[in-house]
Image (cartoon, rainbow, N blue to C red):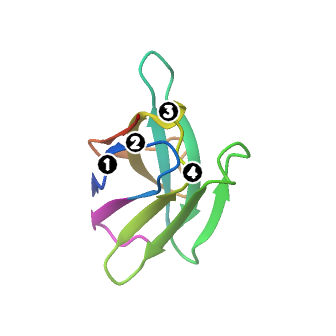
Amino acid sequence: QVQLVESGGGLVQPGDSLRLSCVISGRTLSNYIMAWFRQAPGKEREVIGSIRWSPGITKYVDSMKDRFTMSRDVATKTMYLQMSALKPEDTALYYCAAKHFASDAYGYWGQGTQVTVSS
């Protein structure tokens, strides 16, 4: 089992930056892929990017890579999502997720952290 807990969301103004955290507990993560997703009101959940925990290779959806950066701290088993130049359309519930690299779907999810971008 893998447990995920997100934090760091909040209300920010357009143009601000924000860093989300995802603390991971449970299994050894060396064979896991972690990802950040978001779901805006009335919209489908969309992936932002993923990171192969070991060796830390990241992949992003093209539309996200200019303003969003994923990283991880192996020692604390924490994954981060650094967001910059936030826009109102970035308002969403942000989730972290995990899957074994051989799995098709993400089977482990956090509860989400709300990000609201508004002036």
The outermost residue toward the bottom is: 75
Q: Is residue 82 visible?
A: yes
Amino acid on which disc 3 is placed: Pro
Residue at image mark 1: 9
**Which element is circle 1 on?**
loop
Q: Residue at x 68, y 46 (%)?
A: 61
Inspect the image, locate mark 4, and give the three-letter code of the amino acid beneath it.
Ala
* Residue 82 to residue 87: above or below: below
Instruction: Identify the residue at image location x=50%, y=33%.
Output: 88
Measure how far apart labels 3 and 2 are at the Cα level: 14 Å
Q: CA distance from mark 2 to mark 4?
A: 16 Å
Is 21 in front, or is 10? 10
Circle nearer the viewer, 4 or 1: 4
The circle on residue 94 is: 2
Is residue 15 rendered to the left or right of residue 116? Answer: right
Residue labelled with disc 3: 88
Q: Is residue 52 left or right of residue 24?
A: right
Q: Which residue is mark 4?
A: 85
- Label located before the other in sequence (3 or 2): 3
Which is more foreground, mark 2 or mark 4? 4
Mark 2–mark 4 CB contact (< 8 Å): no
Q: CA distance from mark 3 to mark 1?
A: 14 Å
Query: Label 3: how many residues lie within 10 Å, few (<14), some (14-19) or many (20+)?
Result: some
Q: CA distance from mark 1 to mark 2?
A: 8 Å
Farthest residue to the front: give it.
Answer: 119
Q: Position of residue 100 (x, y in %)?
A: 48, 57
